[in-house]
Image: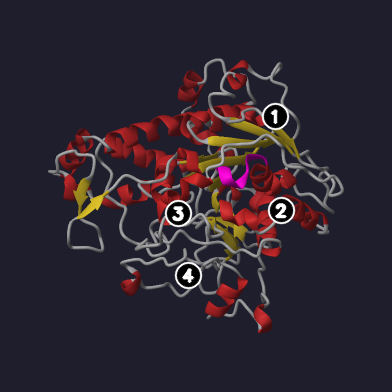
Amino acid sequence: MRRNNTHNAPSQPSLTAKQQSTALLDRDSLGQEYHAQAGNLGESHFIRLADIASAKPTQSMTIKSESQSADVVQHPPKADRDDLLIVMPSSIERMPMITASRGWRQGVQTYVAFEQEIDLATAPAVFKEGVASYNEVYGVCPDQVVSDAKWHKAGDLRATVAPFLANMTIGPNNFKWMLFGDDDTVFLIENVLHLVPHLDPTVPYFMTDHLWYPQPPGAGGPQLYVHANRAAPRCLPCNYTDPTENTFENPSYQYIAPRGCPCNTQTLCEADRIGNFGQGCHWNSNTPGYWYFGHGGAGMLMSSALFSLGTYDDVVDWIWSLGQISSGDSMLMGALHNVLGIIPTDPGYGYFRPTIRLFDPGWNGLQVKGVEDENTGDNGNDPLGVLDRLESALQGGCSDECEDQLQHTISVHLRTRYLASELDQEEVATHLQGYEGSLDHKPAVYLHHKFAALWTQYNQARSSRSWFDIRMSAVA
């Protein structure tokens, strides 16, 4: 496996990037073992601890599912960490974030796009010591000059093209699923590995349940552009079924999602009941990329097949054809729609369970967080709420609903510019003694470490007999 390879992205479309020639492991031979058949994807993957408290710990545990009265066998997932590729845009100044994220992403190959090549001779020792052992590959996409006429942020181009650079560098035969997020996004790998066996990586998927979309009429409150917004158009996975579907009461403002094999404009248009499309399936408003896009910090799951629909150069050409450019995550959505022809797919589980969200859940209600967020609303971004639930679970005080959320959470966005005042600064200082990075990033670095530690404890506990004893003693 290659490590510390660098691939450069052009800053102008005339400079065509070429795929590196170094060959990687071809895993096509793994064949159908990794091509999960579409089955009853709605079958509960939430283990109700009351059902198994008296069971003896074995390799396969017999439990009751929500949708079946008969006993079923909970088998280990077929997916493993080699199926995954983590991709994140970053910058040299934010290198401590990359180092800190190693705690939760160990064993998963990772591609990081920087604004310039990394000189390991001058890189911090703590960074370069882990380059090989954490299976990291680096790419380059230069910063752009910020102006009102073109770029919103210097790293917006990098945030848009990083998935396509990674696919070109790593090779589509060397991963099944790409986890794409910011460098302050945490992915809960064990939960990802429980999700992906129920999806087919040969279907082009761009998956998230955390989408920006305008506040719908009648939903209450001021007119805002909101994330995560359940009114956003999206599909459910191909052949998805759910035991709660027949009894699910869809709120008047929630989009009614069709099955997408794959999800595209035609699929959504044919299922449209609320006037999103006009004649010829043209979008009436809020076209993909314009206040309708996946929130980058919440993270996204992309199948390897997605990248067969368009090349890196196709995406760069489309970006440079634009006049004014918005944020990186909105441009990514625009590229996926205009170049690849794909619209987001919701994982499904949270769609039918309004209290559950897989990508960056939150419990704080609608918030407007800062001046730069004027006219926008935030329904997610509650990393401290997730940490509180993890700590409660370890102490035996997590309710069934709390456990359901923890066992299905895919990602958490740290976004610590709003959290610094809520953290125990003494604890942060003690934990990060000798920290040499920017003080602005210190809270996120701390939370990367804390998530890695608590999530490891949580997974060790829920796989042991003592976990069930703790839970049941708390319920009793």
Please name the residue shown 69% across and 57% down the image: 310
In this rendering, which labeled residue sits more in front, label 2 or label 4?
A: 2
Q: Nearer the viewer, residue 356 or 368?
A: 356
Q: Looking at the figure, which quarter contains the N terminus?
A: top right
Give the x, y percent position of residue 57.
18, 38
Contact between marks 3 and 1 (CB within 8 A): the answer is no
Query: In the image, which residues are magenta?
Result: 169-174
Distance in Å between CA atoms under marks 1 and 2:
27 Å
Please name the residue shown 45% across and 56% down the image: 199
- What residue is disc 3 on? 35
Give the x, y percent position of residue 214.
60, 66
446 left or right of 349? right
322 left or right of 347? right
Give the x, y percent position of residue 448.
50, 32
- What residue is disc 4 on? 259
Distance in Å between CA atoms under marks 3 and 1:
38 Å
Residue type indicated by callout 3? His
Q: Residue furthest right?
A: 14
Q: Is residue 363 visible?
A: no
Q: Is residue 20 visible?
A: yes
- Vertical placement of 408 versus 184: above or below? below
In the structure shown, which secondary structural element does the residue marked by tag 4 occupy?
Answer: loop
In this rendering, which labeled residue sits more in front, label 3 or label 4?
A: 3
In terms of image quadrants, where is residue 85? Answer: top right
In this rendering, which labeled residue sits more in front, label 1 or label 2?
A: 2
Residue type indicated by callout 1? Ile
| Residue 221: image tag | none
Name which of mark 2 and mark 4 comes first in the sequence. 4
Give the x, y percent position of residue 37.
40, 59
Distance in Å between CA atoms under marks 2 and 4:
26 Å
Distance in Å between CA atoms under marks 3 and 4:
19 Å
